[in-house]
Structures are given as structure tokens and as C-alpha cells.
Image: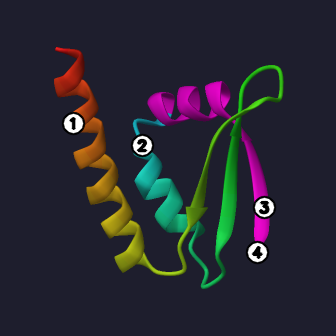
Amino acid sequence: MKTIQIKATPFFDLLKLKDESMWDLFAQMIDGEEKELIFLDEEEKVLFNYILPVSIEKLKGDQALFAQQYADKISQIK
């Protein structure tokens, strides 16, 4: 499995600037090989990681799961 390190702040800033979804970018990265995306903070500490699946179908499933988990966390905060 290939490992890709991503500096989180510049990554998300670029997505905002390009008005692009991270899921759209992840879809472009799918090539049939699983990849581990490791998101780092400014001090190179791991914030979180994500295993990019080998198919768009699995990515869409991950996106739906993420959206549900995010909505659940937001509702707990309110």
C-alpha cells in the first residue's frame, strides 16, 4: 500500500480556493491501488489518516458514512 502524507492546512485551504470537495479529489486519485492518506499538522504530527479505497463505489460509501458521523457529532454539540 502506498502512503501519501498531506499537510492538512494547505490542503484544505487549496480545496476552498478551488471550491472543490475533498471527495472529488479523492475520486481522482483512485487507480485500483489502496493508498493510506496521512494528514499532518504544521508540526508534522499525525492528525488523522484515511485509507483511500480501490473503487469509486467504496469511496461513495465512505463519504456517506463520513457525512452521517459528522452530522451525529454536530448534533451532539448543539
Q: Which residues are magenta?
A: 1-17
Residue under label 2: 20
| Disc 2 from disc 4: Cα separation | 26 Å
Question: What residue type is disc 2 on?
Answer: Glu
Question: What residue type is disc 1 on?
Answer: Asp
| Disc 3 from disc 2: Cα separation | 23 Å
Left or right, residue 60 beside residue 9 = left
Please say whether residue 44 is one of the residues in the magenta stretch: no
Question: What residue type is disc 4 on?
Answer: Met
Left or right, residue 49 beside residue 59 = right
Quarter occupied by residue 56 = bottom left
Please say whether residue 4 is one of the residues in the magenta stretch: yes
| Disc 4 from disc 3: Cα separation | 7 Å
The numbered mark at residue 3 is: 3
- Whether residues under marks 4 and 3 lie with C-beta atoms below 8 angstroms apart, the answer is yes
Question: What residue type is disc 3 on?
Answer: Thr
Taking depth in this image into account, of 39 and 69 the one nearest to the observer is: 69
- Whether residues under marks 3 and 2 lie with C-beta atoms below 8 angstroms apart, the answer is no
> Residue 34 at what x, y percent from top left?
64, 75
**First-in-chain label (1 vs 4):** 4
The residue depicted at 47 percent of the width and 66 percent of the height is: 27
Residue under label 1: 72
**First-in-chain label (1 vs 3):** 3
Residue under label 4: 1
Foreground mark, 1 or 2?
1
The residue depicted at 29 percent of the width and 37 percent of the height is: 70
Q: Is the residue marked by circle 2 packed among few (<14), some (14-19), or many (20+) residues within 10 Å?
A: few
Left or right, residue 44 beside residue 59 = right
Quarter occupied by residue 69 = top left
| Disc 1 from disc 4: Cα separation | 31 Å
Q: Quadrant of the C terminus?
A: top left
